[in-house]
Each structure stands twice: as C-alpha cells, then as structure tokens.
Amino acid sequence: MGSERIRIKDIAKMADVSVGTVDRVIHGRSGVSEASRKRVEEILKQLDYQPNMYASALASNKKYAFSCLLPQHEKGEYWTAVEAGIQDALVAYSDFNISVNLSYYDPFDYHSFGDVARNILEQEPDGIMFAPTVPQYTKPFTEELNKRSIPYIYIDSNLKDQPALSFFGQNSHQSGYFAARMMMLLAGGEREIVIFRKINEGIVGSNQQERREIGFREYMLKHHPDCRIWELNLHAKRDSDDAQMLNDFFRKHPNVKNGITFNSKVYIVGEYLLKQQKTDFKLMGYDLLERNVKCLMEGSVSFLIAQQPELQGFDGIKALCDYLIFKKEVPRENFMPIDLLTKENIEFYSNK
C-alpha cells in the first residue's frame, strides 16, 4: 500500500478510531487517549505513512517570522545579491505566511555584531539566517539560540565547532588553495606576488577572507615556497587613500606583476590599473559585482571566482521553511561551486 494511496480514513478504520483522532496524532495535537495514540502510531509506522506536510502547512495558517543578520554594505556590493535571493524565497514561499526581517552589523566592529544580535533575540524570531563573525563573538549568540531552540543557518562562512542547522557557502579554504594554483599558472615563472586586503584596525571583516588566504598560503608553501608574498593593507573605511597607497606600493616594488584579493572588491585595484594604464599587472579576485565584471571585460582583472550569492540567500530561507514548516531534514553543509570566470566565458555563466 503506497503512502500516496493511504487515506486518513483508511488508517482510522484499521486503528478502530475516528478520523479526527488520526488527524490529531499525525499533527501532534492533544486530546487523544494514550491507547488510541499508540495504536495509530503503530499503524502509521507499519504503513510508513508520510503526511502531506504541504497541505497541512497551508491549512494551519501559522505565521513564521525569520530574521537575517548580514554585514552592512552599499547597493551593488556582494550582499545585495544575497538579499535578492532572500526576496526570491519570500515570493516562492508566500503561501506560507513567512516574513523576513533584515538587520545589519558593521563587519569591522565585533561589538556591532553582538549589539544587533541581542536586538534580534528580543524579536523572538522562529528562525535565523546570518553571516557569522569571528567565533568568540558569534558564540554567545549561537549559545542563546540553542538555549531557546531557535534554528539558525550560516551563510557565507561556517563555524564547525558551533554547528548551525545548515550552512550555505563556499569551502573557503579549498577556494583559496584553488586560487593559488590559478594565480601561479597566470604568473608563469614570476617569483613575487601581492595580496591586497581591506582592513580596519587590524580587522579583515570576514571569516571567509581569512580562510581563503590560509588556503592560498598553504598551496604556496607546498608548491612555491620560494615565491615572495607581499601584502598591501588598504584602509577599509578610507577609500580615498587607496590610489596613494597603490602608487607607493608599485613604486617600491616595480617587479611585482601579479596580485589577488580575497574580498569582493577587486575593482578597487582593477579600476586603479585602468586609470594608470598599467597593463603589465595580472590580477585575480572574487565575486560578480558589476564593477568587478567591468574590470574583467576591460582586461585589468584576469580571473574572477564566483560563488552564487543569490542561491545562498534563497536556499538559506528555503532550508528554514523545509525544517520548520515541512518538517524535513536539512543537509548540514551545502557547498557552493568554485567557478572560475574570464572575459571569454562570463557571458555564458548564470549565477542564479
């Protein structure tokens, strides 16, 4: 007897109870004697009965309020694409009374994360999706969520020792390791490269960037231990200084012809190279921001690594719906592809 052919009234007949009793047992409601509950549960188990959660959710009229905590950003930056995915999910699941409240923290200020997280807890959401900051500042938040049995999803970076219900993002370490291999194919026999960072008072602003760099350096140490790696730390909150700092760097290091950035703002260096008409420098970066893609098309960026941020935003909300509304099991880790794009293949790439 396949579960699609089993009707509630068939189960009621077999258990010798009313249809209402079976319905209450299936949906975990009270008002059923222990003997009846046991009998119905045994039959459900024997028949491997799967209730139609979709229909039940539609009928229940329950409202689900989700919260999302993302880094502050300007329009057109990486997180804009994640937000577009969240909005798509809201439309896709509009039948189920879901709402999403977006909050933002300053990625270069750990205390900002804690402050906004506390405000979110006061709203008592049903589920949360967020981009975690460093583990010691994320931990008080996740401990409180666990205590309150609020399911949460990590997006962009994963904290394995503080496991979420689910994670959506790249394997950052592997992505950095791969980037190093591509960089050295690009560099040919060159023995010097530079890593460009955006930093504010020693803070890089994302776990993802730090792990990419660790993976990158691991590859370099293993395969190119004699290659000199320079670092240029640009001010995260003072864009006006970038050109001067880049001028100084290239004046001091005229032989450095290859560079990479692990954040999503490779356009900062790409646009500088275009402006200076510096065509002898090869540059790699991450993410399909409009300004990054323009640099790729105009030749100041050689490669971009993409990671489908819209899909991360959509799938994160979908996972909360699957878990809370449809009572499905949700996979713990969901890795995004590590896509390498050039100006020759980017027009055929859909990052939806």
Image (cartoon, rainbow, N blue to C red):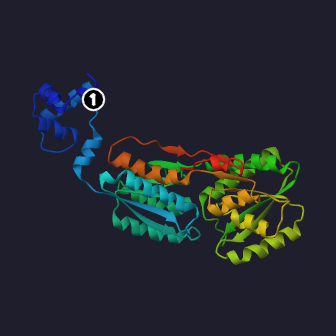
Residue 234 vs residue 37: left or right?
right
Question: x, y (%) of residue 235?
Answer: 69, 73
* 42 versus 333 height, above or below: above
Horizontal arrangement in the rendering, residue 224 relative to residue 236 (left or right): right
Relative depth, front residue between 141 and 102: 102
Report which residue position mark 1 lands on.
4
Q: Is residue 29 above or below residue 139?
A: above
**45 left or right of 331?**
left
Q: In x, y percent, where is residue 119? A: 40, 69
Q: Quadrant of residue 13?
A: top left
For the point 47% across and 63% down, the residue is 69
Whether residue 167 sits left or right of residue 206 in the image: it is left
Which image quadrant for residue 100?
A: bottom left
Q: Position of residue 341 (x, y in %)?
A: 68, 49
Q: Is residue 246 visible?
A: yes
Residue at 88%, 52% (x, y): give it: 190
Q: Is residue 222 above or below residue 297?
A: above
Foreground residue among 319 and 213: 319
Q: Residue furthest top?
A: 1
Counting labels gives 1
Instruction: Indicate the quadrant containing the N terminus: top left, top right, bottom left or bottom right.
Output: top left
Q: Is residue 161 visible?
A: no
Q: Could you say whether the residue bearing mark 1 is in a helix, strand or loop?
A: helix
Which residue is depicted at the point 43% across and 58% down? 87
Q: Residues within 10 Å of mark 1 (few under 14, many from 20)?
A: few
Where in the figure is residue 277, as x and y percent of width and height? 82, 67
Type of amino acid at the residue the image marks with label 1: Glu
